[in-house]
Every structure is written in structure tokens, then in C-alpha cells.
Image (cartoon, rainbow, N blue to C red):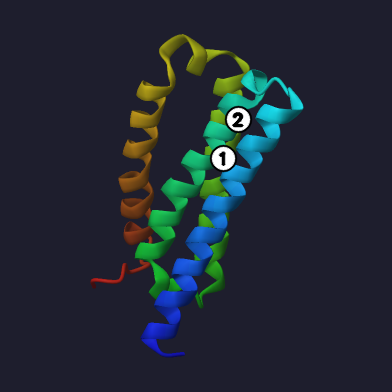
């Protein structure tokens, strides 16, 4: 696949995702569904996609190793269980979403350093 085709495909994908998000927002607003109880779990999903998305993008060279996926899946499981417990106990509601987002942004370099320490090399090395 040429780089131009790949860029066009990426662009179309981003537009489709944006339209899906806007469509979901419009549907939610029109249907009268109370989204407040679900907001923090939607926040968890989005933050997880960002944190693990950036980490995975940095370690593309290791995608062919089954052990890489095992380690990454284990870290994802720990991440999700820990944050779900914090959400259920109301910790995030007490401290707010912004400090919790800051904590997740600390989590990204920790994941990358841990993967590097285990011998998986990021794209630059």
C-alpha cells in the first residue's frame, strides 16, 4: 500500500470515528438517556485508548512477539481493574477527572519504561 493511500485511509477512518462520536452524542441527547452515571466509565475507556494506544504505537517492532502481547494484556488488565475499583469507590468523583487524567498521563511513561525494561524495544532503538 502506498503512503498516499495509507494517508487517505487514515483520514477516512478519522472522519468516520468523528461522525460516529457525533452521532452517538446526538442520539443520546435525543433519546433522553441520562449519561451521567456512565460518564466516568466512558472517560475510563477513552483514557485507556489514549494511554495504551500511544504505548502500542511506540512498540510496533514488538508486535510479532506473543510474549509482548501477553505482557501488554496483563498490564491492561491491571490498569482496568485498578481504575474500575477506584471508580466504584468514588475516588475519581472525589478528586475530579482532571487529576485522574494526570495520573493516567503518568501511567503512559511507566508502561513504556516497563516494556523497555523487559526487553521490548521502542521504534527509535
Instruction: Give the label on residue 74, or none.
Output: none
Residue closest to the far left: 125
Determine the secondary structure under disc 1.
helix
Q: Look at mark 2 in the image and give the residue it sits on.
A: 41
Q: Look at mark 1 in the image and give the residue it sits on.
A: 45
Give the image location of residue 59, x and y in percent: 38, 66
Q: How far apart are marks 1 and 2 (CA)?
A: 6 Å
Residue closest to the far top: 94
Q: Is 33 on the left-hand or right-hand side of 24?
A: right
Which quarter of the rendered picture does the C terminus lie within?
bottom left
In front of the other: 85 or 37: 37
Give the image location of residue 31, x and y in percent: 76, 28
Give the image location of residue 15, x and y in percent: 50, 59
In the figure, 51 relative to 100: above or below? below
In front of the other: 28 or 107: 28
Q: Is 33 on the left-hand or right-hand side of 71?
A: right
Picture quadrant of residue 70 = bottom right
Determine the secondary structure under disc 2.
helix
In the figure, 45 relative to 83: above or below? below
| Label 1–label 2 contact, CB within 8 A | yes
Q: Which residue is at a point 70% across and 36% down the rendered structure image?
A: 27
Amino acid at each position: 500500500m502506498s503512503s498516499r493511500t495509507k494517508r487517505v485511509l487514515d483520514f477516512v477512518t478519522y472522519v468516520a470515528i468523528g461522525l460516529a462520536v457525533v452521532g452517538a452524542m446526538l442520539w443520546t441527547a435525543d433519546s433522553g438517556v441520562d449519561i451521567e452515571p456512565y460518564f466516568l466509565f466512558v472517560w475510563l475507556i477513552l483514557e485507556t485508548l489514549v494511554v495504551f494506544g500511544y504505548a502500542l504505537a511506540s512498540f510496533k517492532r514488538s508486535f510479532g512477539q506473543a510474549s509482548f502481547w501477553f505482557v501488554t494484556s496483563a498490564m491492561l488488565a491491571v490498569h482496568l481493574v485498578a481504575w474500575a475499583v477506584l471508580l466504584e469507590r468514588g475516588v475519581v468523583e472525589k478528586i475530579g477527572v482532571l487529576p485522574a487524567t494526570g495520573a493516567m498521563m503518568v501511567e503512559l511513561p511507566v508502561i513504556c519504561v516497563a516494556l523497555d525494561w523487559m526487553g521490548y524495544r521502542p521504534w527509535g532503538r
